[in-house]
Image (tube, rainbow, N blue to C red):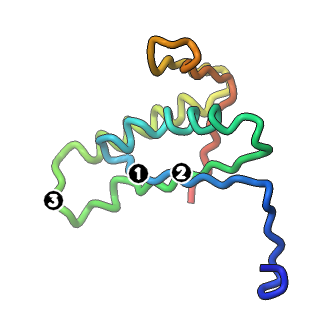
């Protein structure tokens, strides 16, 4: 990359991309959990960059997908807002095993595009 395009590529960094939708269903339901879990799973891996690419409900305006799309999108944005507050603690246990617990006081970062 450096020789061909003049771009220096870091070989010790991890970039994770999560895609889904804020319009309801599994994507919007798991978005926050995935953000915190990926952070937990990549602890000790330097400074991983986790990016979620999620279209807003308006992306489905031309498709007949039901009445709940806007309400689901609003609910997902409210949850993202809640977990982007530094006073909010995330705590989830994915199984009966305490090793599967994910706990964090770090807020999620939301960067609108």
Q: Is residue 80 left or right of residue 40?
A: left
Q: Quadrant of the C terminus?
A: bottom right
| Label 2 with label 3: CB-CB less than 8 Å | no
Q: Quadrant of residue 37?
A: top right
**Category of crowding for the residue at label 2, using alpha-carbon neighbours closer than 10 angstroms: few (below 14), some (14–19), many (at least 20):** some
Q: Which residue is depicted at the point 69% across and 29% down? A: 106
Extreme-bottom residue of the structure: 4
Marking on residue 61: none
Q: Secondary structure at mark 1?
A: loop
Q: CA distance from mark 1 to mark 2?
A: 8 Å
Determine the image quadrant of residue 87: top right
Q: In the picture, which quadrant includes the N terminus? A: bottom right
Above or below residue 98? Residue 79 is below
Instruction: Report, in whole angstroms, how far the alpha carbon at label 2 lies from the one at label 3.
Output: 25 Å
Q: Earlier in the sequence, mark 1 or mark 2?
A: 1
The residue at which mark 1 appears reads as 20
Residue located beneath label 3 in the image: 64
Residue at x 61% of width, y 33% of height? 84
Q: Which residue is painted at 46% across and 21% down in the image? A: 94
x and y percentages locating residue 24 in the rendered image = 30, 42
Say which of 111 and 92 sits in front. Answer: 92
**At numbered mark 2, what does the secondary structure look like: helix, strand or loop?**
strand
Picture coordinates of residue 13, whole percent (x, y): 76, 54
Dot 1 alpha-carbon crowd within 10 angstroms: few under 14, some 14 to 19, many 20 or more:
some
Name the residue beneath numbered marker 2. Answer: 52
**SS at badge 3:** loop
Camera-nearest residue between 91 and 22: 91
Q: Position of residue 72 (x, y in %)?
A: 31, 40
């Amino acid at each position: 990359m450096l020789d061909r395009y003049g771009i220096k590529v870091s070989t010790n960094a991890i970039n994770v991309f999560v895609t889904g939708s804020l319009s309801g269903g599994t994507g919007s339901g798991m978005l926050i959990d995935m953000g915190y879990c990926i952070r937990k799973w990549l602890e000790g891996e330097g400074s991983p960059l986790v990016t979620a690419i999620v279209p807003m409900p308006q992306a489905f305006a031309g498709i007949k997908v039901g009445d709940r799309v806007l309400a689901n999108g609003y609910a997902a944005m409210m949850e993202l807002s809640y977990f982007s507050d530094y006073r909010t603690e995330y705590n989830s246990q994915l199984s009966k095993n305490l090793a599967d617990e994910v706990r964090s006081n770090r807020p999620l970062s939301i960067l609108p595009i």
